[in-house]
Image (cartoon, helix red, strand yellow):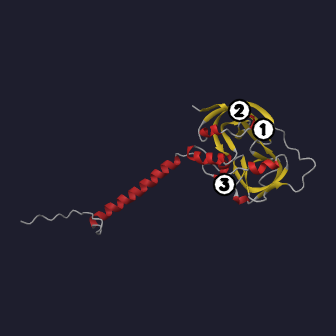
């Protein structure tokens, strides 16, 4: 007696796909691809907007002159600007890659200097990434009297909540330049001397970004690197240096925000 023939399609990897399974497999593959795309979209829309910060290569190299101040991070009070960097603006300075500009700036403190680099810009947070070579130097003609620059204006002690970031990535070198996803990168930048900034959840004298230092205008203590990228509350003295706020943090007050 001959067994009845079973015509049910059966898939074998090394054989041609049976006609009866082709429609099913095609539909399954399309469903998986659409499902993966939908899942990726759902995850993406839950992430914070990285903002409009970026390296302004579209502006081209910017050459400005100004008086250099160490806070201890180097900042430049611009006395001769460009279309993108107005006179009177105060710029934070960094080197290329994950490097600051402190070592290059020490010998120039209090002098009129010429600086060439690429502008990083996020809202009202600006930084100049200095080019290499002789693009950051004392001005050829040092005046007998330096141009007038604003004296630091104490604004008192503040308690604020927000996040400690590296100023370069936060200004636009990376997107996003904050949060847990960026924490390791931020710490590497800070170890390399990139100026740290505090991103406040509420305006401080009208500003949302503050250059942050240790107590007494010392460098940011390494102990605070453990708080980088986290939501924290802290206290410190704030002073306005030109149009840039500088926060001298009291390290004993830093706690994770509730």
In the image, taking residue 244 as reference, residue 200 lies left or right, namely left
Give me the residue at 58% from left, 43% from top: 179
Seen from this angle, which residue lies furthest right?
Answer: 144
Q: Which of 205 and 187 is in front in this view?
A: 187
In the image, taking residue 75 as reference, residue 10 lies left or right, namely left
In the image, taking residue 7 as reference, residue 232 lies left or right, namely right
Give me the residue at 71% from left, 31% from top: 158
Q: Mark 2 points at which residue?
A: 236
**What secondary structure is marked by label 3?**
loop
Which circle marks residue 97 in the picture?
3
In the image, taking residue 143 as reference, residue 235 lies left or right, namely left
Mark positioned earlier in the residue sequence (1 or 3): 3
Q: In this view, does 28 lie above or below 211?
A: below
Label 1 neighbourhood size at 10 Å, few (<14), some (14-19), many (20+)? some
Disc 2 to disc 1, C-alpha distance: 13 Å
Give me the residue at 60% from left, 38% from top: 227
Residue 119 position in % (x across, y down): 72, 54
Which circle marks residue 231 in the picture?
none
**What secondary structure is marked by label 2?**
strand
Disc 1 to disc 3, C-alpha distance: 28 Å
Seen from this angle, which residue lies furthest bottom?
Answer: 16
Q: Nearer the viewer, residue 72 or 79?
A: 72
Residue 19 position in % (x across, y down): 28, 67
Label 2 neighbourhood size at 10 Å, few (<14), some (14-19), many (20+)? many
**What secondary structure is marked by label 1?**
strand
- The reply to whether the C-beta atoms of the residues labelled 3 and 2 are less than 8 Å apart is no
Q: In which quarter of the image is the C terminus?
A: top right
Q: Name the residue under label 1.
A: 240
């Amino acid at each position: 007696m001959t067994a009845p023939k079973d015509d049910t399609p059966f898939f074998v990897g090394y054989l041609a796909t049976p006609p009866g399974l082709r429609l099913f497999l095609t539909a399954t593959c399309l469903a998986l691809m659409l499902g993966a795309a939908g899942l990726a979209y759902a995850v993406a829309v839950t992430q914070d907007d990285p903002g409009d910060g970026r390296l302004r290569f579209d502006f081209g190299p910017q050459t400005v002159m100004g008086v250099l101040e160490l806070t201890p991070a180097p900042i430049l009070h611009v006395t001769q600007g460009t279309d993108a960097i107005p006179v009177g603006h105060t710029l934070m300075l960094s080197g290329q890659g994950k490097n600051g500009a402190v070592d290059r700036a020490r010998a120039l403190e209090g002098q009129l200097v010429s600086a060439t680099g690429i502008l990083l810009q996020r809202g009202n947070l600006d930084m100049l990434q200095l080019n290499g070579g002789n693009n950051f130097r004392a001005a050829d003609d040092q005046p007998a009297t330096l141009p007038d620059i604003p004296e630091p204006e104490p604004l008192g002690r503040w308690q604020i909540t927000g996040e400690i970031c590296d100023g370069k990535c936060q200004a636009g070198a990376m997107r996003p330049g904050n949060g847990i996803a960026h924490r390791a990168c931020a710490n590497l930048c800070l170890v390399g001397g990139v100026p740290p900034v505090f991103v406040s959840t509420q305006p401080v004298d009208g500003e949302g970004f503050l250059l942050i230092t240790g107590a007494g205008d010392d460098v940011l203590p390494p102990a605070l690197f453990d708080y980088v990228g986290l939501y924290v509350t802290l206290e410190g003295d704030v002073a306005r240096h030109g149009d840039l706020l500088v926060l001298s943090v009291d390290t004993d007050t830093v706690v994770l925000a509730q």
